[in-house]
Amino acid sequence: QVQLVESGGGSVQAGGSLRLSCAAFGYTYSTYCMGWFRQAPGKDREGVAAIDWDGRTSYADSVKGRFTISQDNGNNTLYLQMNSLKPEDTAMYYCAADYRSDRLRAIASMTPRIWGTLFAYWGQGTQVTVSS
């Protein structure tokens, strides 16, 4: 049973930084794609960034140049470094994973709002609040 546990959320002022972590348990697949998603109140869930087992990445346009996704394979942990945060980044942030090898390639041609349809496993989320 795959379990994803997010941490690192909190409150920060605009222009500040946060680093989110996602610990993965029970994941035994040799190929994977992992991603960060967010959902603000009253809005649809949207993809933020994704990374595959080979280190290839994809980002939503809204976070390019500000957010960086990375992974520590030895510790089965996914990270999202968020810099230059804006009030519009306020949302619940979720970690997700999928074992299929074609997920990142599919993401490249999809709007971030539907990235989530490609992922099988989800965490419970961590809240990020950015004040102006």
Image (cartoon, rainbow, N blue to C red):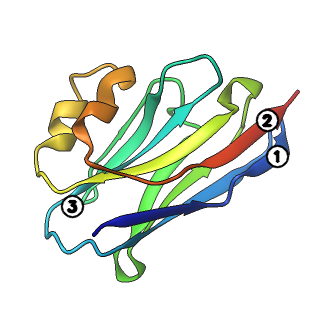
In this rendering, which labeled residue sits more in front, label 1 or label 3?
1
- Name the residue furthest front: 1
Q: In the image, what residue occupies the spot 37% across and 25% down?
A: 112
Q: In the image, what residue occupies the spot 56% across and 49% down?
A: 125
What residue did someone put label 1 on? Answer: 11
Q: Give the amino acid at mark 3.
A: Asp
Q: Name the quarter where the N terminus is drawn.
A: bottom left
Asked if residue 85 is positioned above or below residue 97 in the image, the reply reads above
How many callouts does the rendering have? 3
Q: Give the amino acid at mark 2.
A: Val
Mark 1 and mark 2 in contact? Answer it, CB < 8 Å: yes
- Secondary structure at badge 2 equals strand
Judge the density around disc 3: few (<14), some (14-19), many (≥20) Cα neighbours within 10 Å: few
Disc 3 from disc 2: Cα separation? 32 Å
Disc 1 from disc 3: Cα separation? 32 Å
Comes first in the chain, label 1 or label 3? 1
**Residue 71 location (% of width, % of height):** 41, 65
| Residue 126 marker | none
Comes first in the chain, label 1 or label 2? 1
Horizontally, is 102 left or right of 120 in the view? left
Q: In the image, what residue occupies the spot 37% across and 50% down?
A: 96
Asked if residue 27 is positioned above or below residue 101 in the image, the reply reads below
Comes first in the chain, label 3 or label 2? 3
Q: Give the amino acid at mark 1.
A: Ser
Q: In the image, what residue occupies the spot 82% across and 46% down?
A: 11
| Residue 130 marker | 2
